[in-house]
Image: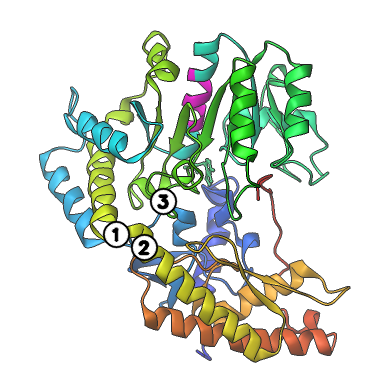
Amino acid sequence: MSDNHSVAKSLELYERAGERIPGWVQLISRRAERFARGVSPLYIERSKGARFVDVDGKEYIDWTRALGAIILGYADPVVDAAVKEQIDKGSLHSMNSGLEIELADELADTIPSCEMVRYTKGGGEACAVAARLARGTTDRDIILFCGYHGWHDWYQSANYLVDPDSGEYPFAGIEPIGVPRALAGTAVPFSYGDLDMLGRLFSEHQGQVAAIMMEPARSEPPEPGYLEGVKEMAHRNGALLIFDEVSCGWRESLGGMQKVFNVIPDMTVVAKGISNGYPMGAVVGSREAMEEGRLMFVSSSYWSDNVGLAASLACIRELKRRHSETVLKEKGIATAKAVDAAVASSGLSGACQGFPTTPGLVFDLPEGADAAKVQTLFIQEMAKRGVHGYTGFGPTHATTDEDIAITADAVEATCRVIKEGLENDSIDDLLTADTRSEPFRRIVR
Ligand SMILES: Cc1ncc(COP(=O)(O)O)c(C=O)c1O
């Protein structure tokens, strides 16, 4: 454990950011309060493989993977070589690049629901495109949704339907400031797993629902028959089914969760793992669901950018060449095993849960324990020991046995601190960081 842990430069930059950048950061999940504020690094100098070096010069093993956007590892040599080659040929031409069609063919070979493709530069943007296509194709306005789908008005308007502090729907504590009130009621949330609720919403909005947009699964598999039921209900009511696989796609299966559970939606949104960190997103789907898009105004200058296309082609081909599904599962299982053993050896109760490629540590805390404080203490103590993240331990292809072993040692030492804190009722004394807050929650397991 490093005894000269400091994030002084990070904190100084964050302070300056507050003066220039409203909200400090570009993605809420990167805010200081999401980690152990005062102990977790906030600014990074460089990243490579499974690690980064922060602006204070300390190296960390990183389990956040740029919030899921990195799948092969930071600065992957193959993807980066393809990007550099493309930069020399031109990042953006004044007319189209054949790469658009080459990538569309690759996606069609990979994702079961894919016959046609549109590109974007990110996940939320791709969700907005999917919503537009669904509304335009069905000539209906309402989208029933479950899960997180980005920052755009179509989606954030849902918070007008609920008490922002209820914690029940996605954005507890975040008000839809700046979102037109006129959109209230056009995007309606439903709870994952609850087919009856979905049925009630279809009855309430008969003939008005354009689509269901949902994350098909996030950390746990659905109940048998659930996704099939959702699809059947959508089609029976003349609505399209859209799977948002921005976060759950690529890891368990290159074809997405739709391939794992064999439920094929009408459209799918992908991003993040598609390009190993280069800006890229895509909406893919059946000809029937997508081809009327030609009549709609769905258009943006940088959607033709060649860097994202080249990165995606290289990334998807590398994932296939490196037998990604098998490798990530093996690494995930090895990580979960090491983390579980470390927790057990500390005497604390808890274990990893979730899909093999994205294990997440869940503590079994004694009654009365403050889970948010314990989680902050976990993040704080791990950061001091050079491991950055929350309690998720999803590997990338670059995660090594050494990374896993160092992480497990840090988990064991951290859990010992937590155990002592719980036993002596001294968690508050052990916390040097502010308790983390969860600015929004996802309504999907
Ligand atoms: C399921 C899902 N959809 C959409 C998004 C938004 O993607 P982006 O942040 O690239 O706009 C995310 C991001 O976390 C996501 O997890």
**SS for callout 3:** loop
Residue stretch rendered in magenta on the structure: 127-133
Whether residue 58 is visible = no
Name the residue beneath numbered marker 1: 323
Query: Does 285 sit above or below residue 328?
Result: above
Tell me which label, 1 or 3, sits earlier in the chain.
3
Tell me which label, 2 or 3, sits earlier in the chain.
3
User: Is the C-beta separation of discs 2 and 3 under 8 Å?
Assistant: no
Q: Is residue 79 left or right of residue 303?
A: left
Question: Where is residue 90 drawn, in percent x and y?
Answer: 15, 37
Name the residue beneath numbered marker 3: 253
User: Is the C-beta separation of discs 2 and 1 under 8 Å?
Assistant: yes
Residue at (62% x, 72% y) in the render: 38
Whether residue 267 is visible = yes
In the picture, residue 390 is in which quadrant? Answer: bottom right
Name the residue beneath numbered marker 2: 326
Could you give the CA–CA distance between mark 1 and mark 3, rounded to whole angstroms?
10 Å
